[in-house]
Image (tube, coloured by chain):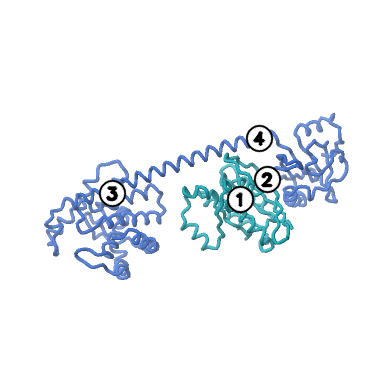
Amino acid sequence: MQIKLCMVGAFAVGKSSLVQRYVQSVFSEKYHTTVGVKIDKKDVTVDGATTRMMLWDLAGEDAFSHLQTTYLRGCSGYILVADGTRAHTLDAALALNGRIERELGLLPFVLVLNKEDLAAGWEIPGERITALEAAGIRVLRSSAKNGAGVEAIFAHFARAPTAACIG
Amino acid sequence: MSAVVRAGDDRDSLGAALAALNLIVLRRETDGRFQRLNSAPDWSGLLGQSAEATGGGIELAGRSDFLDNFLIDALALWLKGEPGRIHSGLWLETDARGSDWPLEAQAVVASADQLLIIQQLSEEYAERVQVMQSARNHLLAEEALEREVMRRTAAVRQREEEIAIRLLAAAGTRDEETGSHVRRIGLFSAALGTALGWDAVRTADIRVAAPMHDIGKIGIPDKILQKPGKLTPEEYKVMQQHTVIGANMLGGSDIPVLRMSRDIALCHHERWDGTGYPNGLQGERIPIEARIVAIVDVYDAMINRRVYKEPIPEAEVLATMAAASGRHFDPDLFALFMHILPEIQSIRASVPE
């Protein structure tokens, strides 16, 4: 079985770092911007069944770069990433989510608040996270730097790929 | 393009130009396979073709996940048959050794030919990455600077608020009211400002300015200010002067927060229907900051205990205020106040008497 997952979000929130941490167990402190699309693969075995994860790392959005939603075609879900230390990246992620839903319909997704290792300096208030969860959004916290919560993001899709495959 | 450029035929000027551009030109045939129209660059193996396959039909499906996705859009263009072109955007194709190759594809309809052009962008990619990295590093630095400015501004605001409240307390003008009351007036006012869509600076200004609304009471004689019974008409006239005294104390400054404080001090007893004081201003001629303070000051004064009165239940307070909306209070602002009542109640709970 093969599933396609897309990493989306504003720039410098840690999309590529999460993929690198998950696929290669590495992390770089230096920010390396992603230009274009990079596809990584990882085989995972859950309950005896092997699933190939195709991870589409899409360049972050900003004034210079806009997400082409056609890249998400056929995906089993997407991972909406925001940086907990930069509140506006959550606004950007939610705006992106709205655009994806308008253009592609409802697809499974999780919202990942990355950089949990810097939680003391987070700008996103807990009440806002609680409100998102109350609205039915699955919110996960992660740190690509120390690996916390990273496996859980991808395992979420690997465990229930058929349920996730509505795209 | 009508003629097939054969492998190794780089003597042909077009072939040489295509080679210089580091691209593969493919024509889609009726069977859905592709015919290469130029000699194969060394990286063409990335897409599963052999360099010697020139002239043979090439099956592209399943060679590259990214390209498969783009071919869906390309097919739509080709089947439409009208002259046009679409771009795939840049992607990195990883070879068997783990090296990334920056590629970009275009689907083109030209002279009834259905063409797919794939270009390898090594140098251009490096330039794009450099430009983008530089731009985003700059944006991140700006963001960090902005956050630091906001953090320091918030610290300054907090100090201003503290100074204002301590001055009010030191002046002894608010015997009947507490420091908590004036702090809540600031927070309630800021909540309404936020609900109105004000920016952070204006909202922070009213949080500091609103607590000073009664500062002019410093100029009212104690015998009137602290009189336990009802004021005579003459005494009431004197009492009304606290608005003008406060405005005079705070006026004449170019500092925005003091200008706002002055307007609030002068106009917070004006009424929407024009029956207030000191100038009988009506409706939107009353500064909006003063209209806000008029609402939150009455709410907080009624709902809390004072030396001269017991607290009034909130439902009763709100009913009384609702009856005065449109006469005493700006009706739109009062509606907004009711809309954010849960937030107001949360502020009350966080700043008790």
Task: Give the residue number, with chain letter if any, for mark 3.
Answer: B261
Q: Are marks 2 and 1 in contact (CB under 8 Å)?
A: no
Which hue belongs to chain B? blue
Residue B99: image location, x then y, percent: 72, 39
Image position, residue B119 (x, y; %): 74, 39
Q: Amino acid at mark 1?
A: Val
Front residue of B281/A66: it is A66
Quadrant (top left/top right/bottom left/bottom right) for the C terminus of chain B: bottom left
Which residue is tagged 4? B126
Residue B13 % position (x, y): 81, 30
Q: Amino acid at mark 2?
A: Lys
* The N terminus of chain B - image quarter: top right
Labels 4, 1: one chain: no
Q: In the rendering, which numbered label is found on residue A8?
A: 1
Drawing shade for chain A: cyan
Q: What residue appears at the point 36 percent right and 54 percent down from the top-left corner?
A: B190
Among numbered discs 4 and 3, the one appearing first in the sequence? 4
Secondary element type, mark 3: helix
Q: Find disc 2 in the rendering and name its residue.
A: A38
Q: Chain of mark 4?
A: B
Instruction: Provide the secondary structure element on which disc 1 rests.
Output: strand
The local secondary structure at tag 2 comes to: strand
3D distance between C-alphas at marks 4 and 2 = 15 Å
| Chain of the residue that carries numbered disc 3 in the rendered image | B
How far apart marks 3 and 2 lie (CA) works out to 56 Å
What residue is shown at x 86% (from left), y 35% (from top)?
A: B7
For the residues beneath circles 3 and 1, the answer to whether they share a chain is no
